[in-house]
Amino acid sequence: MLSRKSMVKAWWKKLCKRLFNSLSLKLGFSVGLVVFLSLLGYAYFVLKSQEEQSLQKILGTAGMFSDTLKKSTKYSMLKYQPEAVLKIIEAAGEQSGVERIRIFNKKGTIMYSTRAVEIGQTVNLQAEACFQCHQKDQPLERIPLGARSRIFSAKSGDRVMGYVNPIYNEASCSTADCHAHPADRTVLGVLDVILSLKDVDLEKKKNTWNIIVIALLFFLGASGLAGLAIYYFVNRPITRLRVSTREIASGDYARPITVQSADEIGELSRSFEEMRQKILETTTALRTSQHEFQTLFESVPCYISVQDRHFNLIRTNRAFRKDFDGSLGSHCYEVYKHRADKCPNCSVEKTFLTGAVYTNEEMVTTTDGQQANVLIQTAPIYNEKNEIEMVMELSTNITALKVLEGELIKSEEAYRLLFNNDPSPIFVVQRTDFEILDANARALDLYGFDKVDLTRKTFFDLAPEDYREELRHFFRSNRTFLGKLKQTNQDGSFFSPTTSPSASRRNSS
C-alpha cells in the first residue's frame, strides 16, 4: 500500500497539473498580472513625481535657509566677529534635517563649519562643493539657481542634498574698516548647506511598499474575479462542450448539444451541434448501407469468400458456410479442394499480382463429398493507401446448368441425326425474308448445291421467276400444306417436289 506521504504527494501533483492546465487559472493570472504591472508602472511615475516634488520643496527650503543664514551672519562678518559667526552656524546646524554647514573662502579653505575638525582645511577645488564653479579654468562668478544644488551619498550611506550659496562682495564689505576686501573681487566665499534626505527616502520607501502591497491585493482580486468570470462564462460551457464531443468521439450521437448563449461559445456549440446532426445522419445511412450489404452478402445464392495474401479465409457468407466446412483462418484450397497446397493457375493470386478481375471454372468438393462445378470470379479490395489488401472470390454453382447443357447437346445431336437422315429434302428458312439457314443432305443432293452456296440464297431463288409471286402469296396466307410446287436445281432443270411448311420457335419454317 502507498504511504500517506506518497498519497499526499500524488494528490498534490495531480492538483497542480489540473491547475496549471486550467484555462480559468491561466487567463485569471494573465489579467491579474496585467493589472499588477500596470499599477507598478503607474506607481513608478507617481513616486518619481512625488520624489521630484519633495526634492524641489527641500531645494526651496535649502535656498531660503541658506539665504537666512547668510543674512544672519552678515553683520558679524562685517564686524569681524568669528566666534559669533560660528555660534550662529552651530545653532543652525542643530536643526532637524541639517547634516552640515560650511563657509569656504575664495581659495577653498573652510573658515567656518559645524564640524570643528574641518575648520582651516583646504578642500580640492574639484570636490562636489566646488565643482560647479571651478569645473573650468576660469571660475564662475555667477552660479545659476538650478546649478547650486547637488545630491550625493554621505559616509553613512544616506543621501544628502548640498546647496551652495555664493557670498558676493558688496559695497559694505569693500569699505569696512575691519578687513576690507578689494572692490574688484566679485566672490568672497561660499556658504555650503548640506541637508539630509533620509526622511524623503524613508517616505519614498514606505510609499513604494504601500503601492506594492496594494498592487498585490489588486492582482489577487483581479485574478480571482477574472478567474471566476472565466470559469462561469467560459470554462463551464467549454466543459459541457468537451463532454459532448467526447460522447461523439465514442460513437454516442443521440444526445444533442444544448446552446445556452448567443456569444462565440454559443456559436461554437451550435456548430458542433450541426456537426453532430450531420455525423448522425451519415452514420445512420452508413449503418443502413452496412446492414443492406450484410443482408445481401449473407443472402445472395452464391459462395462468397474474402481472402488475404496467404489465401486465408477472412470472411464467408451463409451459402459458403452451409456447403463447405471451413472456419475463418483456413486456407481456401483446403476448404474447396481438400488440397495441401495452393491450386495451380489460381485466380486469387492473379488478382493480387495484377489487380484485374479474373473468371474461371473450377470443380470443388462440398462438405458431403459431392463434386460441384462453380464459375469463379475474383475482384481486388483496396485499403486507404490504394494497396490491394484482400481479394473477394464469388463462386456460382453451375452444376445444374452443366447437366442441362449436356442434355441439350444430346438432344441437338439426336435432332441433327434425324434431320440429316430424313429421306425428304428439309429446309430451315428465315420467316421474314425466307433466307435459307440450313438444309439436310437430301436437299443438297436433290438441288445440286453445296451447303455454302445454298445458304446464301432465299427459298424464292429456287423457284422460277413467274412462280415466285404465287409462292410469296402462299406463305403470306399462313397455309400449312402447299402440295407440289415448281422448283429448279443447280443445272436449271424443273421439278415439282411436295412441300409442307411449318413454323418453328425460332420464327423459321
Image (cartoon, rainbow, N blue to C red):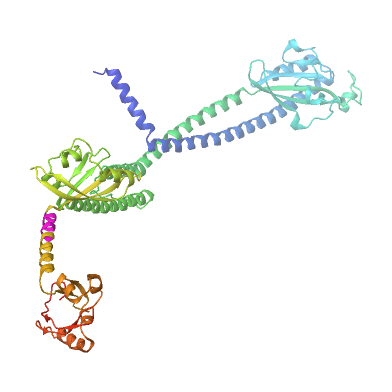
Q: Which residues are magenta?
A: 400-408
Q: Is residue 63 above or below residue 355?
A: above
Q: Is residue 259 visible?
A: no
Tell me the quadrant of the picture where the N terminus can be found: top left
Q: Nearer the viewer, residue 398 or 111?
A: 398
Q: Is residue 11 above or below residue 424?
A: above
Q: Residue 6: image x %, image y %?
A: 30, 19
Q: Residue 365: image x %, image y %?
A: 13, 43
Q: Nearer the viewer, residue 361 or 54?
A: 361
Horizontal arrangement in the rendering, residue 195 relative to residue 249 (left or right): right
Q: Is residue 233 above or below residue 129?
A: below
The quarter holding residue 50 reads top right
Q: Is residue 89 visible?
A: yes
Q: Nearer the viewer, residue 456 or 180?
A: 456
Q: Residue 327: image x %, image y %?
A: 15, 38
Magenta stretch holds residue 45 = no
Horizontal arrangement in the rendering, residue 178 relative to residue 34 (left or right): right
Q: Is residue 189 above or below residue 282?
A: above
The quarter holding residue 79 reads top right
Q: Furthest residue to the top?
A: 117
The residue under the point 35% across, 46% down is 386
Q: Furthest residue to the left?
A: 368
Horizontal arrangement in the rendering, residue 77 relative to residue 484 (left or right): right
The residue under the point 51% across, 31% down is 211
Tell me the quadrant of the picture where the C terminus can be found: bottom left
How many numbered circles does the render carry? Answer: 0
Main SS of residues in magenta: helix
Q: Residue 86: image x %, image y %?
A: 76, 15
